């Protein structure tokens, strides 16, 4: 195991997955520094933590200097496709992700990029389900850009971490103490803590696959 600490950029820390991944990074001994790439200010403070406010991710190239010197990006930003047109969902999911990843690859050529995708993502980009096609298009672009340093994470049902606050809508129901254990009997599931550990693990030591399904996420987290 490579025991060198890493410096990590996180997007989406105001969402459920990003917040849980952030909490794992802040308490994990193998993470030395965390930069939050946020559209709005976060009130969270920690000795490892700093923040860069970028209201429009498509303009990230204007903020290159603070991005230099990082080892990994844990890209957790995104929105549900519910009620969104394909054009708008593409802008949020594909355009923003590729804008950020392209700039980070430019300033940190050896950067490891971990993208939060989802179960049933369509890597063929040809299926009938809009969100799955766009996620698949994004996954494929990440692998083309980063090669062996690109990883796509496909969680399904997720258990939140202690102390999380950004849990809303149906996620608040599915992650509840009484419903999550029941749902996890029927659906693939992992904790967001597992996702954070798995991202740190692949950033330090790689993984045998570049698309991680639920079982792979658990395996990478355990290996770490």
Image (tube, helix red, strand yellow):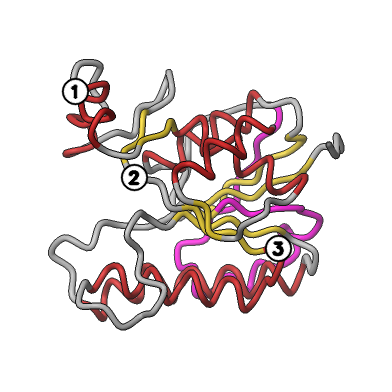
Disc 1: which residue: 179
Report x, y in % for residue 84.
18, 69
Q: Which residues are magenta?
A: 47-74
Dot label at residue 156 = 2
Q: Is residue 214 above or below residue 138?
A: above
Measuring 13% from the left and 64% from the top, which residue is drawn there?
83
* Residue visible at 46% across and 72% down in the picture: 138
Query: Residue 65's x, y, as percent?
Result: 75, 64
Dot 1 or dot 3: first in sequence order is 3
Q: Dot 3 corresponds to which residue?
A: 149
In the foreground, 89 or 209: 209
Give the left or right position of residue 221, taking residue 202 as reference: left
Mark 2, Cα crowd under 10 Å, few <14 / some 14-19 / many 20+, is some
Image quadrant in which the C terminus is located: top right
Label ID, residue 20: none
Dot 1 crowding, Cα within 10 Å, few <14, some 14–19, many 20+: few
């Amino acid at each position: 195991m490579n025991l060198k600490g890493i410096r990590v950029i996180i997007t989406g820390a105001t969402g459920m997955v990003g917040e849980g991944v952030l909490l794992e990074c802040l308490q994990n001994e193998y993470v030395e520094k965390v930069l939050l790439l946020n559209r709005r200010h976060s009130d969270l403070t920690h000795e490892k933590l700093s923040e860069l406010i970028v209201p429009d991710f498509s303009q990230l190239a204007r903020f290159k200097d603070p991005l230099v010197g990082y080892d990994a990006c844990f890209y957790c930003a995104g929105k549900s496709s519910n009620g969104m047109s394909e054009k708008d969902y593409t802008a949020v999911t594909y355009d923003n992700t590729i804008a950020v990843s392209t700039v980070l690859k430019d300033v940190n050529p050896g950067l490891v990029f971990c993208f939060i995708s989802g179960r049933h993502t369509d890597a063929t980009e040809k299926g009938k389900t809009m969100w799955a096609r766009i996620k698949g298009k994004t996954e494929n672009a990440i692998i083309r850009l980063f090669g062996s340093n690109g990883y796509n994470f496909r969680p399904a049902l997720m258990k939140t971490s202690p102390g999380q606050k950004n849990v809303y809508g149906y996620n608040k129901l599915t992650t509840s103490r009484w419903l999550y254990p029941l749902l996890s009997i029927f659906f693939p599931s992992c904790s967001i803590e597992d996702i954070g550990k798995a991202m740190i693990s692949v950033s330090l030591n790689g993984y045998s696959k570049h698309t991680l399904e639920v079982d792979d996420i658990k395996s990478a987290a355990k290996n770490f």
